Amino acid sequence: MIGLVFAAEMHIRKNGWLEAGLPAMFNIGAFLIMNDFEIKELTYHLLAYSLVWILSDLLAHLTYTQPRRLKWPIRGIATVIAAVNYVLLIINGIRGEPAPAALCFGVYSLVSFLISLGYRQPKLMYGFTSSTSLFAAFLFQVYEMSKWIHPIMILGVLFYLIGYFLSHTKRMCTWGTPLQYSGLGLGLVVSVAAPVLGGLDAAIPVALAATLWAVEAFHRKNAWLGFPANILYFLAYFIVLFELRVDEMQFFSMGAALLGLIQHYLLNRSGAKTGAFITGSVSQLILLGTTYIQMLDTEELVYFAVLFLQSIAIMVYGIVIRSRSLTFAPIALVVLGVVTVIYSALRDISTVVLIGCTGIVLLLLGILAVILRERITRLGERLSSWEA
């Protein structure tokens, strides 16, 4: 009742300083009421106190037209109380008390949605999306559903789809951006948790998160956004291989190289030449370097055949897109592989003989380069127009 008196006096006298009485008196009233009901849980108390300060500020914002001198201190106190409660709820929920956390985050989710509409600030929707995500996560833990990443990823997809739809409307376009970013952020959170929770089905939400990032990259026509998409796709691929107990390095390197070459193509088309060069170099180094190392370790010719076929594939791709690094680097690695195989086969021969044969081969190559110097010069002029 005293808080209502402060509210009435603030409007009658048009004195913004009297606003301090509203949340202060209401806070004392909330404390007394909760003590009467013998509610001792700290998180419930902080929930009530934060709502008192938040809703008091919202009420003043909607009804009081004069300058509000205390709006930022009141908002700061409300934010601090809510932030402390968020941390306590998350800690308690992880420690085995998900029911209070789910209840409180459900209330915070509803209030966050209301204040975002009341203030007409799209950025406040981040409070709604984060609270709703935490509410869903702890709610599923209440019902002992340990694989919470699947429903949370579905929630992230819904956020993104609603945001995508709103961003294409004239009146609501600014409201769509927070929802889209929230969906992308939830995808990253779920992807980090997926390998920890494990299971073959853990790859599904990661693949969905990667798809959201790929759609965002296509929508914004930004090839750099393809990096998170490719990394997440590779993570989903890695989870599948790990759960199937695949330990052959070729499967991992080929997946990484394929995604890297896709990103190289996107960056090359978008005009990011430096990024394309780095991505292409790293991709072929991962693919061909892994095969070469396995060939050295096992001394099996099958890996040389794999190295040869992989080099041919990369070289063809390099010729098609007119890239020097993706054309000559595979040739160099194949030559290195041939030399390695030859020296492995002839390692029982005297070192002097091997050095002499190597010198003769290099001398013949030098003579051939001198004879064909004009053709080599013309070839160099043609390749100068290629990308790095």
Image (spheres, helix red, strand yellow):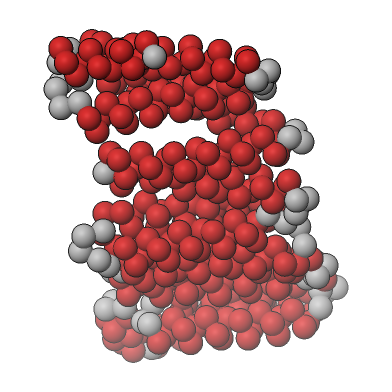
**Residue 383 falls left or right of residue 318:** left
Q: Where, quadrant-wise, is the C terminus in this rendering?
A: bottom left
**Side of 7 where 49 appears, left or right:** right
The quadrant the N terminus occupies is top left
Residue visible at 35% across and 25% down in the picture: 56
Where does the image place residue 85, in percent across and percent down from the top left?
A: 56, 26
**Figure check: 98 above or below 358:** above
Tally of numbered tags: 0
* Horizontal relation, residue 164 to residue 237: left or right: left
- Which image quadrant for residue 241? bottom right
Residue displayed at 28% across by 17% down: 7
Q: Looking at the picture, does residue 283 appear above or below residue 128?
A: below
Measured as percent of width and height from the top left, residue 188 is found at 54, 53
Residue 128 as seen in the image, left or right of residue 34: left
* Residue 100 visible here: yes
Instruction: Residue at 57% x, 71% y: name it.
Output: 257
Relative depth, front residue between 304 and 264: 264
> Dividing the picture into quarters, in which one does residue 337 lie?
bottom right
Q: Residue 182 in the image: x percent, y percent?
A: 45, 52
The front one of 181 and 256 is 181
Which quadrant of the view contains residue 34? top right
Q: Identify whether 76 is placed above or below 267.
A: above
Given residues 242 and 91, the one toward you in this image is: 91
Residue at x 60% of width, y 26% of height: 44
Furthest residue in direction right, as rendered:
348
Residue nearer the viewer, 33 or 361: 33
Image coordinates of residue 342 in percent, x first then y, are 73, 79
